[in-house]
Amino acid sequence: MPERNAFVDHCLALLAPLGPVAPRAMFGGWGFFLDGNMFGLIAYGQLYLKADQASIETFAAAGSEPFVYEGKGKPVTMSYWRAPEDAMEAPDALLPWAELAVAAARRGAAKKNKTKKPARQRKTPRLS
């Protein structure tokens, strides 16, 4: 499990205006959660924020790049984009980007919930 460091604390301070952001150590980095939805991650010393079709162009226009890692011999591109450098200086600079990420995470969670199959109803044996 990675040790919580100054960069994690810095990101949490920048994200504080969003509400109770919960950091979780995962995969050698950190995930940031709000209301149970993962909207950000720290990997390789960078903050990445969740993006989807509604926000990718905004991140790209700011010069951001997606998070890519090497998986099973080929690059895997995730739906998280690096936070713009100038947004990392103050909470009010990062807030609009973080809000985009939270919105993308919520849309993704809503989409997953719609596609989940309902639990199969089992017939219970009559015990009388």
Image: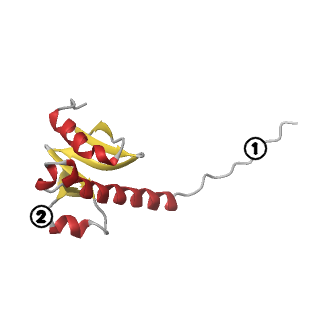
Which SS class for mark 1? loop
Q: Is residue 36 visible?
A: yes
Residue 63 shows which numbered tag? 2
Depth order, front residue of 113/128: 113
Is 85 on the left-hand or right-hand side of 71?
left
Depth order, front residue of 73/51: 51
73 over 127 or under it: above or below:
below
Residue 29 position in % (x across, y down): 22, 40
Residue situated furthest right in the rendering: 128
Residue 91 position in % (x across, y down): 21, 48
Residue beneath the point at 17% across and 32% down? 5
Q: How is the image coloured?
A: secondary structure
Q: State the separation of the CA atoms marked 2 and 1.
A: 58 Å
Residue beneath the point at 42% across and 46% down? 35
Residue beneath the point at 75% across and 44% down? 124
Amino acid carrying label 1: it is: Thr
Residue 124 shows which numbered tag? 1
Mark 2 crowdedness (10 Å alpha carbons): few <14, some 14-19, many ≥20? few
Which SS class for mark 2? loop
The quarter of the rendered structure image containing the N terminus is top left
Depth order, front residue of 24/78: 24
Amino acid carrying label 2: it is: Gly
Mark 1 crowdedness (10 Å alpha carbons): few <14, some 14-19, many ≥20? few
116 over 38 or under it: above or below:
below
Residue 70 position in % (x across, y down): 17, 51
In the picture, residue 99 is in which quadrant?
bottom left
Residue 69 position in % (x across, y down): 18, 51
Q: Is residue 72 visible?
A: no
User: Which tag, 2 or 1, sits closer to the chain's start?
Assistant: 2
